[in-house]
Image: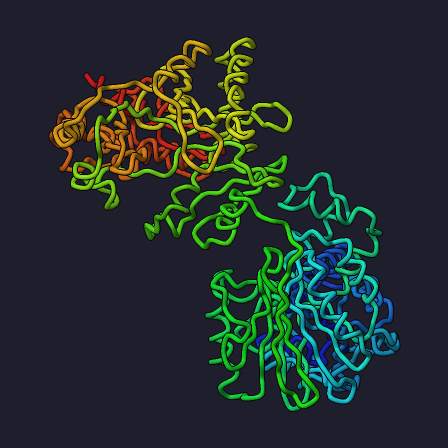
Amino acid sequence: MKYLILLRGLPGSGKSYWVKENKLEDYTISSDNVRLLFATPSIPFAACYKDRGISQKNDKDVWELIHSLVERRLTNGMTTIVDATHLTEKSINCYKSFCMNNNVRCIVLDFNVNVEQAINNDMLRKGTCRYVGEYIIKRMNENTEKVSKWVDYTDKDRIIKMFNECLEPVDYNEKYDNIVIFGDLHGCYEPLKQWFDKHPVNDKTKYIFCGDYEDRGIQHKELFGFLLQHRKDFNFKFLKGNHSRRLLQIAERDKDSIRYPEYYNTLEQLKDFDPIELKKFVRDQDDMIYFTFRNKVFCVSHGGISCLPSLKLNSDEYVKGHGTYQMAHQVDDEFLFNVSIENDNIYQVHGHRNVNNEPVQVNEHCFNLEGGIEFGGELRILQINNKGECHIHTIKNTVFKQLNDDSKIVNEFKYSSLIRKSQNPDGISSYNFNRDAFYDKKWNNLTCTARGLFVYDDTDKVACRSFNKFFNLNEVKTSSLDWVVKNWQGITNVYKKENGYLGIISVDVRNNEFIFASKSRTDKEYALNLKRIFNDKLSDEQKDNLKKWLLKDIDKHGGNAYSLVVEVVDPINDPHIIKYDSCELFMLEAFVNTFKEETISYDALKQLHDLIGLKIKGKICETSNLKSTIYGLCNSKEHVEGFVLEGCDFNGKVVRVKVKTKYYLMWKKFRSTGLFDRSFDCVNGLTNEQQVFAKQIYLRAKQLIALQEGQTIQTNELINVNAEVDNCNTLIYKDLIGGWHINIPKVIEFVENMK
């Protein structure tokens, strides 16, 4: 239930004072404050200058904005107070339609002071823009109307308690003999049917459903036939889950929105249902239910919270729960600590998240009803009998979509706290390790696999892929010099590392069209730039040859095509450190589109080069003397980014390590600091004068970026390097997503050519 609280009373009746006194400004939209956003105080009629008041001239726009803000906040489940007079029936009824259609409880809080007291209070504001005047207050009092019966009334003390302490629980003691609470259903009906076959619907039993009725399961038709049959029953209560918005997308057949996983599967099963009924089902769902029964109090929500429910909590807190998806156990412990220690009769029940496979009863006062029903787990049920005793029931689900090995891996990605998912167009999702994995170095098989990996939502097969994550020399234990020397076997190949960004080219096996992907996206700037360069570089014949090649072994690989991974070099839109004269695509590797990393040989890559003409990664050498080779690479003075060593470990698995040159590392450090680190003195080869000049160029470039970003720099503060730099504007560039950066290859060129 969402709450809209309308303050009602004459000017000077204490509405704004009450809001401020109770520290409720963050929850309040004030009509006077909005008026002041449209216009500064003005002089009314023939008043003197000091009697400037709040202008009413923009009230049409003011109230359009207020109503829009109120609806936006209530749509997002945020309790909202509107501080205005609300003395006419029209001023309150304007909220009626929205409240009725969106399950919003509208409460009017009346500030009952007589007209004389309001005038006296208003006199205390004389000399400020908040002063209204006796005449206007009397006129407003005469025009005050009764309020419609559709709103609720309450007193100020009760509202404050609901904000600062908790909402009042609904009393179910007289009405029901049993309470039955069901966990997440996710399109699974068989276990629910078994329960009601054994325990037929009874008017003296309250049935509460924790949310997430849709997606993943294969019995949506049967399940929603049952749910919609009981949608209006007084003893059935349906709570909102985080998947409810997806049911709205199904109901609206929204062709323009991004398809989520399971969209088509769910749509097919619900295609015969009335979209209006589906929308009403979502509309009538509550965020949570808070009730008392047999001397016990229960807070039931989808996600689980760490405190008692109050008006300060919004929908997302009940629906998604407090903390991250992985923190269900911690949140239940917090609830126990914050609430149940002092209130021994209060209990929490929720579903939604259970990545650690917690038992139904997590602790003395918390129950977790998420049982993985859609994957062949169980429907979890909590029954509270007439004596107030809690009984746990679980029913194994035997009707579910059997997962293949690919789907099992995708599910691991979905439920990992270290992997982020990006929804792309055309039913493709990408998976990549997140910041926590990167900065905390939480590397394992899962996080290393989820790196530039694109998957079809409907089949969980790989659509295109790049390298598994591999590391710089000495970055992790398995890339340390000692580990490599001791554990790598046989011949190791050494390749030149180009300096651009990774792109992937594959073919969508569903429609035979090319897929271009980069940085977890198939539809954003870097992927589109890859596509542009690809189209510029290859003729129609070469494109056809590549498409045939990517699909050539599809039958042998179980319907999976190849992915061609390229280094995208763009010296105009995306210069890095190393200078290039033109846009290039360097072929780095070709992978079979499977979760297991499976590549082709370097000779096969050369044959592909002969077929389509794209440049190929440069092979430096083959070696069996790793220690000596790595030492030489580390001390290389070549002006390249570095090298990639590719070999096999003692299990025959392909392993890789990156070695960056000191030249590259020196200029990379300069790019971020504008300074030359002394540890690179042996390679920089720059005179003191060149280093000073480089710092001047760096500062000049920073000034140019500041100017491009709209900052003001005095002319006499501008650093002048024109004597050595023909065109200062070439020192910076605008990248593919609109950001300004220092063009390091151009800086290097100016510094190295300094006279």
Q: Is residue 13 above or below residue 729?
A: below
Q: Quick one: 583 or 42, which is closer to the camera?
A: 583
Q: Is residue 534 visible?
A: yes
The color scheme shown is: rainbow
The residue located at (36%, 17%) in the rendering is 616
The location of residue 154, given as percent across then percent down, is 75, 83
Quarter of the view holding residue 554: top right
Q: Quadrant of the N terminus?
A: bottom right
Give the left or right position of residue 320, taking residue 278 as reference.
Answer: left
Q: Is residue 689 visible?
A: no
Give the left or right position of residue 68, taking residue 578 as reference.
Answer: right
Give the number of marks: 0
Q: Quadrant of the C terminus?
A: top left
Q: Quick one: 183 or 652, which is closer to the camera?
A: 652
The location of residue 183, given as percent across then percent down, is 64, 67
The residue located at (56%, 29%) in the rendering is 559
Quarter of the view holding residue 157: bottom right
The location of residue 149, given as percent across then percent down, is 87, 76
The location of residue 617, given as percent across then percent down, is 34, 20
Q: Quick one: 122 or 506, which is closer to the camera?
A: 506
The residue located at (57%, 32%) in the rendering is 523
Q: Is residue 166 above or below residue 507?
A: below
